[in-house]
Image: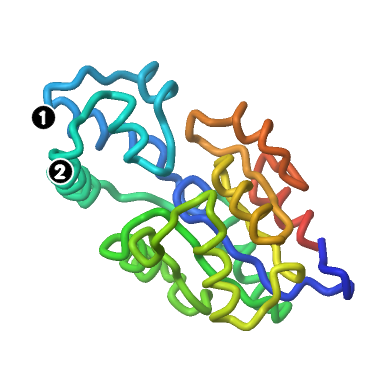
Amino acid sequence: MSGANGRLAAVAFDWDGTLVDSAEATYNCYAEMFAALGVAFDRETFARTYSPAWQRTYVALGVPEARWAEADAMFVAAYARQQVKLLPGARELLRELRERGVAMALVTSGSRARVPAEVERLGLGGHFGTIVCGEDVARRKPDPEGLLRALSTIGVAPERATYVGDSPEDIGMAHAAGARSIGLLGGFPNRDALRASAPAVLAASLDEVASALR
């Protein structure tokens, strides 16, 4: 998959659910957090309300905005006790792209307090030319701000880049930025919405992502 000049210059990735297996950890942290807030939450609720823009989940479950900061703090504290792992094929995919000379970036809704530390813990610190986190932008996915900022930092035009993500917000961001998109069917409960978002490629694994990028 390449740009108009025939060569793929950059790949930007989502983090949660795309490179790391964080769906179960996210559910566990939500369950703990919402229990502390006195809000009913189960797997059906998770499936019905999940969004990487987690404030939408708060709204759907009636958490008043005055308590969002408290909820965020509880989630972060709960997540710090989780140990997420890379998804199968993630390390190999990043190594292959690096060997091919393809620039890489990370564009995530996750927090700067968490994601870069996870990247380092998992031994991926040297792979990404830039990491754009949720609080680094004024407008979150599917707005293209984060992806355009990352591509500008690494010096690649959107038409020569591909974005890989597991949510419809990821695909919407890629479309709005003018980049190609690959949707990865991951562990979060948004597969139908991801299909409906019409990525250029829909992949069932990171091995399939690697094949599409070749």
Q: Are marks 2 and 1 in contact (CB under 8 Å)?
A: yes
Tell me if 67 is positioned left or right of 143 in this view: left
Residue 67: quarter of image? top left
Q: Which residue is mark 1?
A: 36
Question: Which quadrant would the C terminus be assigned to in this image?
Answer: bottom right
Determine crowd level at label 1: few under 14, some 14-19, many 20+ residues with C-alpha closer than 10 A: few
> Percent position (x, y) of residue 46?
37, 25
Calculate the distance from the C-alpha at mark 2 to the C-alpha at mark 1: 9 Å
> Which numbered tag is attached to residue 208?
none
Q: Amino acid at mark 2?
A: Met
Tell me if 130 is positioned left or right of 75 in this view: right
Look at the picture and state if 173 lies above or below 42. below
Look at the picture and state if 17 lies above or below 116. above
Q: Which sits in the foreground, 177 or 54?
A: 177
Q: Residue at x 35, y 61 (%)?
A: 115
Tell me if 5 is positioned left or right of 112 in this view: right
> Percent position (x, y) of residue 50?
41, 31
Q: Amino acid at mark 1?
A: Ala
Q: Which residue is mark 2?
A: 74
Q: Residue at x 59, y 53 (%)?
A: 173
Residue 164: quarter of image? bottom right
Which color scheme does this rendered protein use?
Answer: rainbow
Q: Residue at x 78, y 71 (%)?
A: 8
Sequence-earlier tag: 2 or 1: 1
Total numbered circles: 2
Tell me if 87 is positioned left or right of 95 in this view: left
> Percent position (x, y) of residue 183?
66, 45
Q: Which sits in the foreground, 152 or 190?
A: 152
**Does dot 2 land on a helix, a strand or a loop?**
helix
